Amino acid sequence: MCVPPRLRGSLAVWLFEARAGVYIGDISRRVRKMIWEQVNALAKQGNVVMAWAINTESGFEFQTYGANRRIPVDWDGLRLVSFQPIEK
């Protein structure tokens, strides 16, 4: 689902839009937290996934916002993705 243009514009200040709705960048923890606050305030009915590199076995961490069939789950310390059944 799309997010409001205001959020997309805010993301474009800090990140590179590699494809419509896909933003990438190398940002600090502080900026990442600030961006996530904006996501929570502005995403409304949209859904967002934010991922970043960390020094763990998987090499990354992520968090999600909004409704999505993909749900992050912790499996013995690894963050994996579980799929909910398709709603009919």
Image (cartoon, helix red, strand yellow):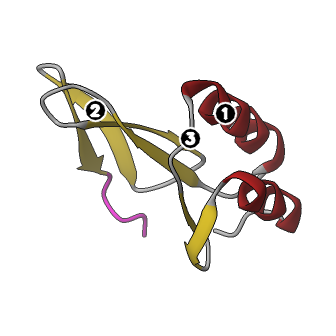
Q: Quadrant of residue 56?
A: top left
Query: Mark 2 belongs to which amino acid?
Result: Val
Which secondary structure class fits the magenta region best? loop
**Numbered label attached to residue 73:** 2
Specify the segment rendered in magenta: 84-88
Query: Mark 3 belongs to which amino acid?
Result: Ile
Can you tell which of label 1 and label 2 is closer to the viewer?
A: 1
Which comes sooner in the sequence, label 1 or label 2? Answer: 1
Please report the residue visible at 60 percent of the width from the left and 47 percent of the height from the top: 66
Please report the residue visible at 75 percent of the width from the left and 51 percent of the height from the top: 43
Q: Quadrant of the C terminus?
A: bottom left
Q: Is residue 63 above or below residue 56?
A: below
How would you rate the neighbour count of disc 1 (Cα within 10 Å): few for under 14, some for 14-19, many for 20 or more? few
Do tag 1 and tag 3 residues touch (Cβ < 8 Å)?
A: yes
How would you rate the neighbour count of disc 2 (Cα within 10 Å): few for under 14, some for 14-19, many for 20 or more? few
How far separated are the C-alphas under marks 2 and 3? 25 Å
Q: Is residue 17 magenta?
A: no
Can you tell which of label 2 and label 3 is closer to the viewer?
A: 3
Q: Is residue 87 above or below residue 25?
A: below
Question: Could you tell me which secondary element the residue under label 3 belongs to?
Answer: loop
How would you rate the neighbour count of disc 3 (Cα within 10 Å): few for under 14, some for 14-19, many for 20 or more? few
Do tag 2 and tag 3 residues touch (Cβ < 8 Å)?
A: no
Q: Nearer the viewer, residue 82 or 80?
A: 80
**Numbered label attached to residue 27:** 3
Give the residue furthest to the top. Answer: 77
**Numbered label attached to residue 31:** 1
Report the side of 71 relative to 38 (left or right): left
Q: Quadrant of residue 8?
A: bottom right
Q: Nearer the viewer, residue 6 or 80?
A: 6
